[in-house]
Amino acid sequence: MGIENRRDGASPDLTQGPPDSEESVSLLGGNVILTKLQEIVNWGRKYSFFLYPFVTACCGMEFMSVAGPKYDLDRFGAALPRFSPRQADLLMVVGTISHKQAPILVKVYNQMAEPKWVFAFGVCAVSGGFYDNYSTVQGIDTLIPVDVYVPGCPPRPEMVLDGLLKLQEKVAKEKWSDWPRGAAPVTINKC
């Protein structure tokens, strides 16, 4: 029965030379999508952030409103927070970081699996805010690499969503050679 169908022209004869590009497209029939593996993986990562909320101060209330139903982080694939750094790939540092908390933040960052991204939420996480004193870290980028900065005291939910969109654009353009980043560039001695 298969031989009869081949004679009738129901299936292509692959014993001849390679078909030209127009014939090969007609053989696929629009059922196949051709792309790069790296682009497919980045597309999946772009829409599946597993965030670890490192909430320390008043920006936490604004973070809760962003995670609520009005602004809906689920649209960006970041709905379910993970409270284990080994299950998260997006570290959201929300609020003021003191020098006492810095070793904990670095430890959480180092425990996260690659690839990982860091989101500085609020002016205190970005630059220390109005706490220009001896006990406050003047920006978390002095401790760990930061991918997206969202300033504001507190930042509006629209700004946070815009930051997530910028992070999605960055993830879509990444190459596999960008990873692994490795441990945090600073090491903090235990007190």
Image (cartoon, rainbow, N blue to C red):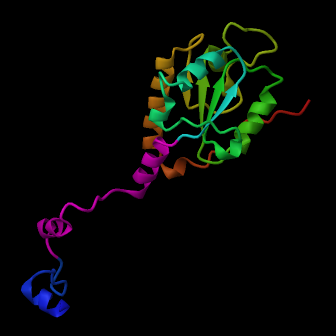
Q: Position of residue 93 (x, y in %)?
A: 65, 26
The relative height of residue 175 versus residue 161 in the rendered view (above or below) is: below
Q: Find residue 90 and report its image quarter.
A: top right
Extreme residue in the right direction = 191
Which residue: 54% across, 47% down? 178
Which residue: 49% across, 46% down? 45
Q: Find residue 106 and report its image quarter.
A: top right
- Residue 4 or 167: which is nearer the viewer? 4
- Residue 87 magenta: no
Q: Magenta part mainly helix, strand or loop?
A: helix
Q: Is residue 188 visible?
A: yes
- Residue 62 or 184: which is nearer the viewer? 62
Which residue: 66% across, 11% down? 129
Residue 2 placement, left or right of 174: left
In which quadrant is the C terminus drawn?
top right
In which quadrant is the N terminus drawn?
bottom left
Tell me which segment is drawn in magenta. 19-48
Q: Position of residue 35 (x, y in %)?
A: 33, 56
